[in-house]
Amino acid sequence: MAAAESTGNEQNQKLVQRWIRHLRTERDLSPHTLSSYKRDVGKYVTWLGDKDLGDVTATDIENYLVYVRGELGLAASSTVRMLASVRGLHSFGFQERALPIDVAASVPAPARGASIPKAMSVDDVVSLIDACPNGDGAGPLQLRDRALVEMLYSTGARITELLDLDVDDWDAENQWVLVRGKGGKERIVPLGTPALRALEQYQVRGREALNKKGSPALFLNRSGARMGRQSGFKVVSEAAERAGVGPVSPHTLRHSFATHLLEGGADVRVVQELLGHASVATTQIYTKVSPQHLREIWATSHPRT
């Protein structure tokens, strides 16, 4: 079971309180509107964890929007509203000279009704994974990052699901992991050989060195506590930067997992079960055939190619 999450650092909380007080006294907003703003920015600073609002980058905010859209399942309209709340907080902090810049002003609003993120090619996924050092020369955190990225693609699990794993939730002998999804629903997901090897290396040479507090968590941070969501996003985005494959989030790997399985001939209901979707209708957004796959089918099937 995951440890209770931090509600953000004290400095961030104080700025949120000042902003809400400003909205109530200076702008005379309704209690309902104030409650919505408070709820939105509360989720945001919780996601930031110990990171100061003054150190937040546009990429951090974009990653947060990916998180609320993909991991929390917010609709595009709700994600737009969430960004408006985040922008309001940052703008207020800048105007009050509590923040050095208004970083949120440069973050574009997600398009309403936007399509799912484009899946990566298999080659790009391999490049991303290989950008995470492994083997004898890798340190504990590098081994952890390799295991995490391997598992994201091998299982198609949400980043929050993997970071909630404990050491007893995977079975090396039978090559599977027990994932707890939304609503506490459990599912067994197979582990590919590369992911299994990366996990075993991390367990033996990485996690043992990081586990200073006797935590049951599988993925630990440098202080020995359970790894946070923002750190998980950072691992993937930095690996993508090193690999030169463009912006990638943990949810991009989930999309790629589903797309590659379906293009390889997997049944949509099997993919539904692996992803932990309650309805097959949710999984069917991945069944749109890519132009590349269409061409491959045409080239091998049409009599006059």
Image (spheres, rainbow, N blue to C red):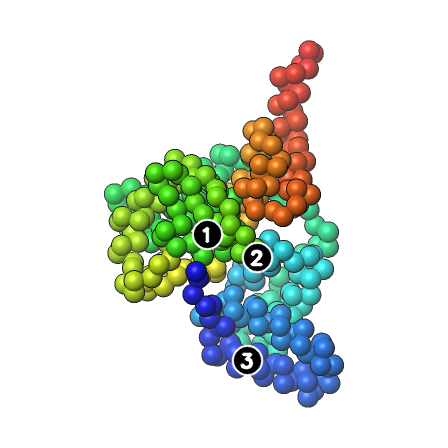
Residue at position x 65%, y 74% in the image:
37
| Percent position of residue 119, x then y | 58, 40
Which amino acid lies under the numbered mark 2 shown in the image of this protein? Gly
The first of marks 3 and 2 along the sequence is 3
Which amino acid lies under the numbered mark 3 shown in the image of this protein? Leu
State which quarter of the image contains the N terminus: bottom left
CA–CA distance between discs 2 and 1?
15 Å
| Percent position of residue 183, x then y | 57, 57
In this view, the mark in front (2 or 1): 2
Residue at position x 67%, y 82% in the image:
23
Answer few, some or many: residues within 10 Å of disc 2's Cα (few below 14, many 20 plus, some between 14 and 19).
few
State which quarter of the image contains the C terminus: top right
| Percent position of residue 42, x then y | 57, 72
Q: Is residue 66 visible?
A: no
Residue at position x 42%, y 41% in the image:
176
Which amino acid lies under the numbered mark 1 shown in the image of this protein? Leu
- The relative height of residue 248 versus residue 18 in the rendered view (above or below) is above
Pick the front one: 89 or 17: 17
Q: Read off the residue under disc 2.
A: 183
Q: Read off the residue under disc 1.
A: 162
Answer few, some or many: residues within 10 Å of disc 3's Cα (few below 14, many 20 plus, some between 14 and 19).
some
What's the mark number on residue 248? none
The first of marks 2 and 1 along the sequence is 1
Determine whether the residue tagged by mark 3 lies in a helix, strand or loop: helix
